[in-house]
Image (cartoon, helix red, strand yellow):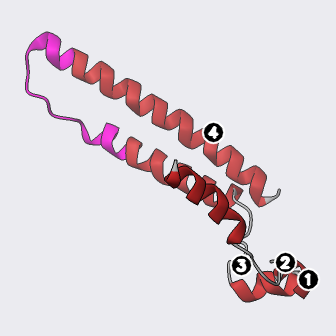
């Protein structure tokens, strides 16, 4: 079996156990409210919640693909100099002066 399939299976197991621990917490707190006792969480629910989060985190790591390099050198190897240096050789800004001065003088 591939790691992606194992990761997806573990993801569903982690998700279902997280939903179950959430429901168990809700039921336990409802019971404590009904009998008017202190809010103390059983260790079983806490362990189940932590277990499900750890299993879900492992599944995310297994399903994610390999990381891509983010170095500029590795990106520059893929491009030619024509793609990198595509700016104009000179810039003229005197065309803006006509509109700026016309609005100021009016």
Disc on res. 69: 3
Instruction: Looking at the image, tell me whether mark 4 or mark 1 is earlier in sequence order.
Output: 4
Label 2 sits on a secondary structure element that is: loop
Q: Would you place residue 62 above or below residue 12 in this image?
A: below
Dot 3 crowding, Cα within 10 Å, few <14, some 14–19, many 20+: few
Q: CA distance from mark 1 to mark 2?
A: 6 Å
Disc on res. 86: 2
Residue 27, image x and y in percent? 31, 19
Residue in the foreground of this view, choosing between 69 and 56: 69
Residue to which mark 1 is pinned: 82
Q: Quadrant of the N terminus?
A: bottom right
Residue shown at 70%/46% (left/top)? 8
Q: Is residue 55 visible?
A: no
Q: Which residues are magenta?
A: 31-47
Q: Nearer the viewer, mark 4 or mark 1?
A: 1
Instruction: Looking at the image, tell me whether mark 4 or mark 2 is earlier in sequence order.
Output: 4
Q: Residue 73 lies in what quarter of the image? A: bottom right
Q: CA distance from mark 4 to mark 2?
A: 48 Å
């Amino acid at each position: 079996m591939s790691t992606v399939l194992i990761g997806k299976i573990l993801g569903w197991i982690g998700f279902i156990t997280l939903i179950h621990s959430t429901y168990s917490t809700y039921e336990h707190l409802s019971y404590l409210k009904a009998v008017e006792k202190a809010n103390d969480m059983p260790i079983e629910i806490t362990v189940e919640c932590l277990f499900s989060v750890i299993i879900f985190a492992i599944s995310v790591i297994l399903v994610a693909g390999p990381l891509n390099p983010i170095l500029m050198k590795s990106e520059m190897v893929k491009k030619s100099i024509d793609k990198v240096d595509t700016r104009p050789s000179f810039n003229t800004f005197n065309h803006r002066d006509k509109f700026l001065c016309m609005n100021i003088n009016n």
